[in-house]
């Protein structure tokens, strides 16, 4: 997926999300979380995100981190675009993964369960098929690997390209739509003139 196409899709998804009306404050908070993910993905694209392989990072990654930390410490005006693009990309995945887990809890009416269990329940309840949340599942696994793996996620990342991240964004918006209230209908016909 080309960058311009991905940005158009992210912005279209933001328009879809804007139509979602949260039934509760929890629903509204999740919509805000998904919006944060869309914003972060758009920013990653704006900064020219390019996935970097583990091999390209291993030799110089510590040096890169040291330079970035020293620049932040010194208040440098020069911003590391490549690193920031990756930061925003990862932030978008974290937002989508967190929203996914929370949305599954709302859809299923179950709380303290893992994502695989919640997906099984949601499929059994007829909320969606597994393919409807495949990209979100990949993002969730990556984020859990980042959170819980001793070495983070450099070697075993699943979501490293824009197309899969956009697919996760699309699936997150679709789940928000499933738990939202219908948009209020206007009682007026035609434009409002004041």
Image (spheres, helix red, strand yellow):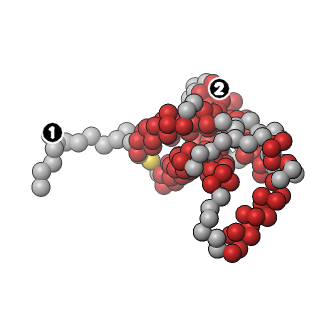
**In the drawing, what numbered circle is on residue 130?**
2
Can residue 102 be seen? no
Which residue carries the number 1 mark? 189
At horizontal 57% and vertical 30% (from top left) the residue drawn is 1
**In the drawing, what numbered circle is on residue 166?**
none
Can residue 126 be seen? yes
Viewer-nearest residue: 80 or 45: 80
134 left or right of 40 in image: right
Q: Position of residue 169 (x, y in %)?
A: 56, 39
Which image quadrant is residue 67 in?
bottom right
Dot 1, crowdedness within 10 Å: few (<14), some or many (≥20)? few
109 left or right of 83 in image: left
Q: Position of residue 89 (x, y in %)?
A: 63, 47
- Picture mark count: 2
Question: In terms of secondary structure, where does tag 2 sit?
Answer: helix
At horizontal 63% and vertical 33% (from top left) the residue drawn is 164
């Amino acid at each position: 997926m080309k960058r311009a196409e991905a940005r158009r899709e992210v912005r279209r998804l933001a328009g879809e999300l804007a139509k979602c009306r949260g039934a509760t404050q929890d629903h509204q908070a999740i919509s805000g979380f998904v919006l944060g993910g869309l914003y972060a993905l758009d920013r990653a694209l704006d900064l020219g995100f390019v996935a970097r392989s583990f091999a390209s990072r291993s030799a110089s990654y510590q040096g890169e981190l040291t330079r970035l930390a020293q620049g932040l410490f010194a208040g440098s005006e020069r911003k590391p675009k490549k690193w920031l693009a990756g930061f925003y990309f990862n932030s978008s995945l974290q937002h989508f993964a967190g929203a996914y887990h929370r949305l599954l809890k709302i859809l299923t009416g179950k709380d303290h369960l893992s994502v695989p269990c919640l997906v099984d329940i949601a499929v059994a309840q007829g909320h969606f098929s597994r393919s409807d949340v495949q990209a979100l599942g990949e993002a969730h696994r990556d984020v859990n690997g980042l959170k819980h793996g001793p070495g983070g996620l450099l070697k075993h990342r699943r979501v490293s390209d824009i197309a899969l991240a956009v697919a996760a964004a699309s699936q997150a918006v679709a789940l928000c739509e499933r738990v939202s209230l219908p948009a209020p209908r206007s009682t007026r016909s035609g434009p409002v003139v004041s």
